[in-house]
Image (tube, rainbow, N blue to C red):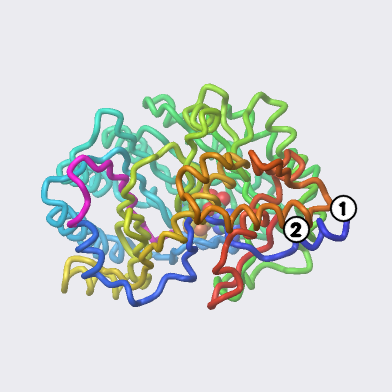
């Protein structure tokens, strides 16, 4: 690896699931703004619903999600009515406008929900937000939670997609991250849900964990491929102990360096592609017949807080503690602490703690960054067509990025700005060149590769 590549790989940059990114949200955007934004959505708007379940019955030391460990169900039982109240308040503000294209339950571990609670939540969402004919219902599953009645409840609730956390199958790695989960356990979930009609299965695998080597990551990939997932997400472990204090349980001396992380991700990606999957954006893979691969080939892939998606809804409604919503006017984020969230919802129906209203400059840079993260290239004609004279500043930055690139990561010929296949692992750091917020404010990020 050249010196410039090594420093690019080690440089902390955002994951760009939004632009501006969440550290730039501020308390100047309130529930009143959110209510106004909802009230201004046009009648035919497609709505994508995200419900955050910030609870787990175990705490994996690598975890970077907004969640907390609970040993009893009571906190969840107290939380769910608030989520339903929030749904009702959002529906009241929409006043019959819009229809839902998707419901996604993420966390945390939504697989912890009791069967009746899961069915009731999904039913209420369907009653309030009028599902479109191609409505999708997806849920994140920790295999550790799964019981026979949950399999049946997921099917009864109409779950059409599941995402299962695998991380790594090697017991030594699992021990180092406090995430014990056998291959058999994972296989039982894949098979159990497929038998009940779930059409699409995603597996999450991590590289950059303690004790992982190129060989061990490849072995995990082999096992994951044996389950024939429709999609595979290959994430680099984000070590952010200043934000997630339980990550201090991970022995930093066992973490691979930037060059080793790159070797692991490159070897894993090669193995997945050799098995017939299409590489999507930075870290996803899909069968060529999967909707994600079809959308990517058509330049219609999107990126939001759940990562890469086919979901093109212009309004993402975030429900639950810490959830982020994305509306044409800007982003809103709910308060993170669950107690505060419940109190806010009971008091005023919404729980916005921060957000950001988008300027026209934000929209243009957000579009550039999303297209780079999704397609790895930008058509200059389309950039000019969409943003007119304002695009010229970005074109100068593209020329500058291409001039300074000694490693063959980007190409720029005046008609197209593209990230090369060799540059794919550095997508985040190329996108960062167009982020005018980077380095301002409080954000600290994980390394680029
Ligand atoms: C909300 S979690 C998973 C859902 C479920 N609770 C589970 O653990 O299986 C979603 C995914 O985020 C990824 N993830 C969590 N913490 C991460 C970190 N620090 N760095 C990179 N990926 C992480 C994991 O791959 C995980 O499966
Ligand atoms: S990885 Fe999943 S199960 Fe583990 S703590 Fe995070 S959200 Fe919970």
Does the rendering let one see residue 175?
A: yes
- Pick out the residue farthest to the top: 289
Q: Position of residue 54 (x, y in %)?
A: 39, 61
Contact, mark 2 vs mark 1 (Cβ under 8 Å): yes
> Vertically, is 160 above or below 262?
above
Residue displayed at 32% across by 72% down = 29
Q: Position of residue 219 (x, y in %)?
A: 74, 38
Q: Position of residue 411 (x, y in %)?
A: 73, 43
> Vertically, is 224 above or below 140?
above
> Of 295 and 177, which appears nearest the observer?
295
Residue 327 counted in the magenta span = no
> Vertically, is 71 above or below 242?
above
Q: Quadrant of residue 62?
A: bottom right
Residue displayed at 58% across by 47% down = 373
Q: Mark 2 and mark 1: span between their CA atoms?
A: 10 Å
- Pick out the residue farthest to the right: 2
Residue stretch rendered in magenta on the structure: 39-56
Label 2: how many Cα within 10 Å (few below 14, some 14–19, many 20+): many
Q: From the viewer's perspective, is 417 left or right of 336?
A: right
Q: Which residue position is annotated with label 2?
A: 9
Label 1: how many Cα within 10 Å (few below 14, some 14–19, many 20+): few
Does the rendering let one see residue 174?
A: no
- Tell me the element at label 2: helix
Q: From the viewer's perspective, is 424 left or right of 159?
A: right
Name the quarter where the C terminus is drawn: bottom right
Q: Which residue position is annotated with label 1?
A: 1
Task: Decide if ligand 1 comes within 8 Å of the CB at mark 1.
Answer: no
> Of 84 and 310, which appears nearest the observer?
310
Residue displayed at 44% across by 30% down = 192
- Tell me the element at label 1: loop
Q: From the viewer's perspective, is 95 left or right of 281?
A: left
Q: From the viewer's perspective, is 145 left or right of 230?
A: left
């Amino acid at each position: 690896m050249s010196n410039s590549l090594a420093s690019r790989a080690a440089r902390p940059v955002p994951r760009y699931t939004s632009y501006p990114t969440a550290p730039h949200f501020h308390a100047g955007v309130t529930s009143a703004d959110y209510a106004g934004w909802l009230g201004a959505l046009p009648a035919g708007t497609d709505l994508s619903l995200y419900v955050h379940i910030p609870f787990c019955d175990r705490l994996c030391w690598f975890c970077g999600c907004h969640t907390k460990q609970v040993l009893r169900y009571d906190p969840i039982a107290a939380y769910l009515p608030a989520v339903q109240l929030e749904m009702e308040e959002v529906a009241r503000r929409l006043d019959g406008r819009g229809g839902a294209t998707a419901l996604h339950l993420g966390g945390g571990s939504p697989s912890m929900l009791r069967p009746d609670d899961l069915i009731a939540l999904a039913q209420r969402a369907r009653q309030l937000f009028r599902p479109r004919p191609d409505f999708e219902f997806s849920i994140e599953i920790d295999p550790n939670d799964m019981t026979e009645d949950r399999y049946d409840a997921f099917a009864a609730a109409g779950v059409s997609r599941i995402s299962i956390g695998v991380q790594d199958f090697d017991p030594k790695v699992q021990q180092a991250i406090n995430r014990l989960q056998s291959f058999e356990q994972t296989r039982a979930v894949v098979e159990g849900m497929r038998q009940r009609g779930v059409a699409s299965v995603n597996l999450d695998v991590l590289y950059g964990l303690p004790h992982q080597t190129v060989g061990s990551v490849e072995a995990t990939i082999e096992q994951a491929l044996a389950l024939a997932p429709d999609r595979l997400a290959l994430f680099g472990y984000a070590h952010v102990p200043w934000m997630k204090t339980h990550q201090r349980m991970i022995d930093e001396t066992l973490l691979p360096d930037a060059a080793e992380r790159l070797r692991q991700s490159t070897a894993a990606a090669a193995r997945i592609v050799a098995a017939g999957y299409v590489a999507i954006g930075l870290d996803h893979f899909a069968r060529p017949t999967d909707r994600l691969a079809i959308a990517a080939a058509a330049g219609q892939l999107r990126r939001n807080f759940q990562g890469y998606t086919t979901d093109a809804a212009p309004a993402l409604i975030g429900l639950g503690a810490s959830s982020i919503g994305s509306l044409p006017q800007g982003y809103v984020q709910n308060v993170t602490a669950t107690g505060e969230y419940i109190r806010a919802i009971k008091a005023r129906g919404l729980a916005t703690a921060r957000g950001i209203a988008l300027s026209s400059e934000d929209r243009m840079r957000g579009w550039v960054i999303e297209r780079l993260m999704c397609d790895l290239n930008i058509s200059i004609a389309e950039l000019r067509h969409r943003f007119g004279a304002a695009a010229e500043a970005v074109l100068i930055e593209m020329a500058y990025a291409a001039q300074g690139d000694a490693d063959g990561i980007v190409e720029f010929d005046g008609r197209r700005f593209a990230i090369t296949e060799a540059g794919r692992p550095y997508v985040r750091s190329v996108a960062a060149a167009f982020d005018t917020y980077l380095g301002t404010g409080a954000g600290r990020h994980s390394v680029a590769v």
